[in-house]
Image: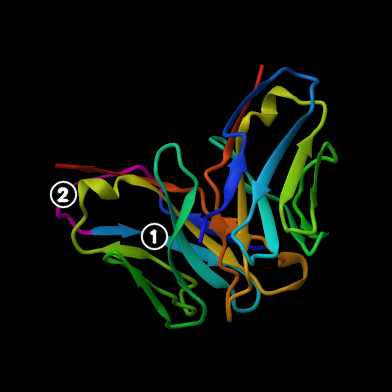
Amino acid sequence: KAGVTQTPRYLIKTRGQQVTLSCSPISGHRSVSWYQQTPGQGLQFLFEYFSETQRNKGNFPGRFSGRQFSNSRSEMNVSTLELGDSALYLCASSVLEAGGYEQYFGPGTRLTVT
Amino acid sequence: GDSVTQMEGPVTLSEEAFLTINCTYTATGYPSLFWYVQYPGEGLQLLLKATKADDKGSNKGFEATYRKETTSFHLEKGSVQVSDSAVYFCALSSAGGTSYGKLTFGQGTILTVHP
């Protein structure tokens, strides 16, 4: 089975612009979660989608949004970019395993805001 | 809310040394526990997991036991290799409700193994 794929792998944007990142989950996985990874804050949960519905959201401003399509592919959007949004954005997919919520991660999109 | 605390890093070892990375957690109910590893320039890879008290997860020579009485999930390996050099993250997943799809991570421990 192919793993989780994320596009693009690298992105450079200017403050005030917006950006869209894409994630294709493992075939058969219906849950997609997004995380932001920075040296200062570590790994922080952004949101999770399941069957095109957002089920959970982390503590991020409304500039961060996402959606999921009927084929389970997901996108996240960041509007009005700030320097502090520079980070590695990780997507993870999962199928609910018995007794645990095991997640499989993509390679990430490295966003640099200048 | 849920939280995970990992031992202060970084950790530097010689090849074939014994490794322990401490991890403790705070959570309501009975979370599932995970160790993930991240190599430079890559995403996270699941290393091992445990879903109930006293479970032992193991993979590639690494082991961790779910200790509910001490709320711990320490990672161990008897003999590390240079190729084990990476960042290790302890994480937990609580059941349902506002925890859907959410892993709570520790701050990560950088491991460097010298030949």
Residue at disc 2, secondary structure: loop
Is B17 magenta? The answer is yes
Percent coordinates x, y for residue A9 in the rendering: 57, 34
Percent coordinates x, y for residue B5 in the rendering: 50, 56
Which sits in the foreground, B16 or A5?
A5
The segment highlighted magenta reads B8-18
Left or right: B68 with respect to B14? right
Q: Which residue is mark 1?
A: B22
Amino acid type of the residue tagged 2 in the rendering: Glu
Percent coordinates x, y for residue A110 in the rendering: 58, 32
The rendered magenta stretch, by its main secondary structure, is classed as loop
For residue B3, the mark is: none
Left or right: A97 with respect to B68? right
Quarter of the image that includes the C terminus of chain B: top left
Q: Identify the chain of the residue marked 2, using the numbered disc in the image.
A: B
Q: Identify the chain of the residue marked 1, using the numbered disc in the image.
A: B
- Against B74, is B8 above or below? above
Quarter of the image that includes the N terminus of chain B: bottom right
- Against A90, is A104 above or below? below
Left or right: B35 with respect to A72? left
Quick one: label 1, few (<14), some, or many (20+) residues within 10 Å?
some
Q: Earlier in the sequence, mark 1 or mark 2?
A: 2
Judged by depth in the image, the label closer to the viewer, 1 or 2, is 2
Marks 1 and 2, Cα distance to the nearest angstrom? 20 Å
Residue at 69% x, 30% y is A85
Residue A25 figure quarter = bottom right
Residue at 67% x, 50% y is A34
Which sits in the foreground, A1 or B69?
A1
Which sits in the foreground, A25 or A14?
A25
Q: Which residue is mark 2?
A: B15
Is A12 magenta? The answer is no
